């Protein structure tokens, strides 16, 4: 599986996006211990969801866990059906892209 360049590039892209997201979060967010705005509703002009740095750390940890689980599943399924392995790797990349955009949005709100 690790010799397949498509799957390898998809998982490396996911890892790089998670690393970029953590860099954006660590450099862009304030260092203080105050609450962070996670979601802002423009229609009602109010804050919907507030959390701290621990919430973002938990989300980052979940992203890493999802990456490891998908890597394991893709490795187990690769010999039986390569198409499912490609779909798992591509799905992981899409989730990593969404997480990257979410981390940028949270950083810009705060």
Image (tube, grey):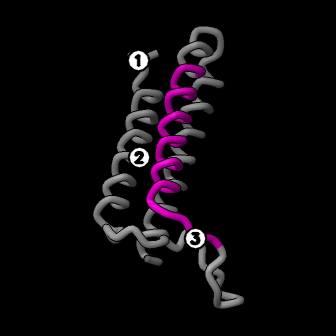
Q: Earlier in the sequence, mark 1 or mark 3?
A: 1
- Looking at the rendered structure, the number of numbered marks drawn on it comes to 3
Marks 2, 1: nearer the viewer: 2
Residue contact between numbered discs 2 and 1, judged by CB atoms under 8 Å: no
- Seen from this angle, which residue lies furthest front? 33
In the rendered image, the vertical position of residue 10 relative to residue 78, given as above or below: below
| Cα distance between the residues tagged 2 and 3 | 22 Å
Closer mark to the observer between disc 2 and disc 3: 3
Residue labelled with disc 3: 50
Earlier residue among tags 2 and 3:
2
Mark 1 → mark 3, Cα distance in angstroms: 40 Å
Badge 1: residue crowd in 10 Å (few <14, some 14–19, many ≥20): few
Which of the image's four quarters has the C terminus? bottom left
Per the rendered image, the range of residues in magenta is: 49-73
Mark 1 and 3 residues: CB-CB less than 8 Å, in contact? no
- N-terminal of the pair, mark 2 or mark 1, is 1
61 versus 79 height, above or below: below
Which numbered disc covers residue 2?
1
Q: What residue do we see at 39% from left, 39% from top?
A: 15
52 vs 66: above or below: below
Residue 54 is one of the magenta-drawn residues: yes
On the image, the x and y values in percent for residue 40 come to: 60, 79
Q: Is residue 70 magenta?
A: yes
């Amino acid at each position: 599986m690790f010799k397949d360049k498509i799957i390898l590039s998809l998982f490396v892209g996911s890892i790089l996006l998670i690393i970029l997201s953590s860099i954006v979060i660590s450099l862009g967010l304030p260092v203080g211990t105050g609450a962070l705005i996670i979601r802002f509703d423009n229609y009602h002009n109010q804050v919907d969801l507030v959390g701290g740095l621990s919430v973002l750390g938990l989300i980052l940890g979940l992203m890493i866990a999802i990456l490891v689980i998908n890597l394991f599943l893709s490795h187990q399924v690769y010999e039986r059906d390569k198409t499912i392995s490609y779909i798992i790797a591509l799905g992981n990349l899409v989730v990593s892209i969404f997480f990257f955009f979410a981390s940028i949005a949270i950083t810009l709100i705060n």
